[in-house]
Image (cartoon, rainbow, N blue to C red):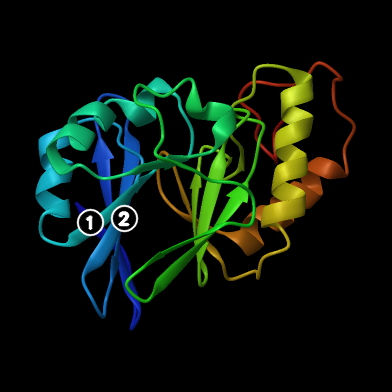
Amino acid sequence: MLTIEKDDQLQIDRLEIAPFGTNAYVIVCGATGHSVLVDAPGEASRIEKRLRETNPEYILMTHSHIDHVGALLELKARLGLPIAAHPFDARSLPSPPDIQLNDGDEISFGTVRLKVFHTPGHTPGSLCFLTGRYLIAGDTIFPGGPGRTNTPAALAQIIDSITRKIFVLPDDTRVHPGHGDPTVLKKEKEEFAVFSSRPHDPDLCGEVLWLSS
C-alpha cells in the first residue's frame, strides 16, 4: 500500500493488485475516517484490511472489466458495502450495483465529495471520480495516452470523453489511473496537442500513445 495523496481534507492510498497490476484506491476523509474504495481488482483480504482501519461506505467501480472486479463479490460479502457503478456497465459486473451513478452525480462520505464523470470509450459505462485536484481515472486516461479501445469509433468516443470532461479541469489536476503511476493534466494536454496536430490512420485504435501513434 502506498499513500499517494494527503492534505488537510483527505488521504488517498493506492494498492497495486496482482496479476494485472491494477490499482485499487482507498480515499479516506481526514476529519471523520469515513472512506470509499474505488475498484476491487483482487486480493480481497489485503483490501479489506485497509478498509477496516477506516469507516468504509461504498465500493465505487470505474468500469466492469475483469481486472478491476476480481474481489468485488468477496468484499461485498465480507463488508456489506453498497456497490456503485454506471448503468451501462451494470450487467457486466459480477454483482449488480446497489447504486447507479450518472454523469454529474456526487458521492459524499464524511466531509469529502466526489464528482462523477461518465467517460465512455474504454467501456460504455466508464467513470472517473474527482475530488479537489485529484482525479481517479480508471482506464480512461493514462500517462501518455487514452485507455485501450477496440474500434476506431471507441477511440473517437474516449477522446471526446477526455477532451470534454477531463481536459477542461485545471492543469495541476493529478490523474491517478487504473494501472501504473499518476500523471499531471498539464503534461497530458500538451502531449494530446501534438497528437491532434497530426493526421492518423482512420482505423487507429487499441493501445494509443499521444506522442507516437
Instruction: Looking at the picture, tell me which residue is in the foreground, 58 or 151.
Output: 58
Element type at mark 2? strand
Give the residue type that dot 1 points to: Pro
Q: Which residue is mark 2?
A: 36
Residue 85: percent from left, percent from top? 47, 39
Towards the viewer: 42 or 124: 124
Element at label 1: strand
Name, please, the residue furthest toward the front: 98
The residue lying toward the viewer, choosing from 193 and 95, is 95
Q: Give the residue number, with chain letter if any, for mark 1.
A: 56
Q: Position of residue 121 (x, y in %)?
A: 66, 31
Q: Position of residue 112 (x, y in %)?
A: 40, 71
Residue at image position (18%, 29%) is 74
Tell me if I can see residue 138 in this picture.
yes
- In the rendered structure, the answer to whether residue 83 lies left or right of residue 73 reads right
Question: Do the residues bearing badges 2 and 1 touch, measured as CB atoms within 8 Å?
Answer: yes
Disc 2 crowd rating (10 Å Cα; few below 14, some 14-19, many 20+) is many
- In which quadrant of the rendered view does residue 208 lie? top right
Q: Residues within 10 Å of mark 1 (few under 14, many from 20)?
A: many
- How far is mark 2 from mark 1, CA to CA? 6 Å
Q: Which mark is residue 104?
A: none
